[in-house]
Image (tube, rainbow, N blue to C red):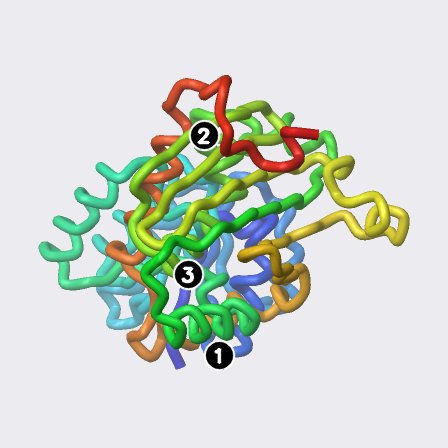
Amino acid sequence: MKRFAMTGAAGYIAPRHLRAIRDTDNTLVAALDPFDSVGILDSYFPEAEFFTQPELFEQHLDNLRRNGQGVDYLSVCSPNHLHEAHIRMALRLGADAICEKPLVLNPQEIDRLRDLEAETGRRVWTILQLRTHPALLVLKEKLEAEGSSSPKELTLTYVTSRGTWYLRSWKGREELSGGLATNIGVHFFDMLAWLFGRVCRVEVHLREDTAVAGYLELERARVRWFLSVDVNHVPLALREKGQRTYRSITLEGQEIEFSEGFTDLHTEVYRRTLRGEGFGLDDTYEAIATVARIRNLPITRDSANKHPLLKS
């Protein structure tokens, strides 16, 4: 049984990590969050110590380490701008870090973490859950079997609607979350690089608080993409059925719909990580570099490569 600690225990994504720790037969010994609405801990690890101050949390973990009861992993579920600091805390304490996406906001932070891995001998892992999605694993096998050298034409649409709270939280502040493409879309950009190779060209056609869209050229694909947290971008027929999320890839005119099957992906990533087969710094570098470019590039006003939702 491995011993875990967690930062960001009151956050939106924390329950998936708590479930993954439990379902891989491990235990949580301590958790941190400045907000104390963490009753969720009672459903998973009621004996875990809880802290609202990072200094006391780190001191507690250091005391455990000195007494031979240190943690093996620190699960980082805190706001994005804190990820690097909390990963550094994990490695200083002699633990590996398992960090929610986005791992960091800028590729320079990955370079710094590589140095720290070398210094401490510990590892940094991240949650690239789409690489474990059954439908996308089938697609990857199909693409590899085809071995075509000509680039594929793709349209990626991802709508995951959020209430008004989203823009009023840290997620709506670019300096804390990295913006919509980083906070919501980073694992999709990772998926594209995983399937189709290095990103060669980036255009940004729309960059607003609730939607961002553009165009990517990868080594083996050309992609028109659209990301949104506005429920009005869910197709009407699905919206009328009460569906608030829509994830779709159209590949060479063929629809690959993968809105289902997301529930247990964190647990699968944890299983891989615990086997030493998880996703590390090099795996996530391309996606982090891409979203940093999307955040900073000027808008391309006139382009023949716009997503269909922009054209309409």
Q: In the orientation shown, which residue stands out farthest toward the right? A: 240
Q: Position of residue 209 (x, y in %)?
A: 59, 25
Residue at 51%, 50% (x, y): give it.
154
Q: Secondary structure at mark 2?
A: helix
Q: Position of residue 14 (x, y in %)?
A: 55, 55
Q: Disc 1 or disc 3, which is closer to the eye?
A: 1
Q: Disc 3 or disc 2, which is closer to the eye?
A: 2
Residue at 47%, 67% (x, y): give it.
28
Q: In the orientation shown, which residue stands out farthest toward the left? A: 119
Q: Position of residue 220 (x, y in %)?
A: 35, 54
Whichever of labels 1 and 3 marks the residue nearer the N terminus, that label is: 3
Name which residue type carries label 3: Ala
The disc at residue 176 is 2
Name which residue type carries label 2: Leu
Give the vertical position of 28 relative to 1 (above or below): above
Give the residue at mark 3.
5
Would residue 305 be found to the left or right of residue 291 on screen?
Answer: right
- Residue 54 seen from this side: yes
Cα distance in 3D space between marks 1 and 2: 31 Å
Name which residue type carries label 1: Thr
Q: Position of residue 143 (x, y in %)?
A: 42, 69
Give the residue at mark 1.
24
Whichever of labels 1 and 2 marks the residue nearer the N terminus, that label is: 1
- Asked which quadrant contains residue 64, the reply is bottom left
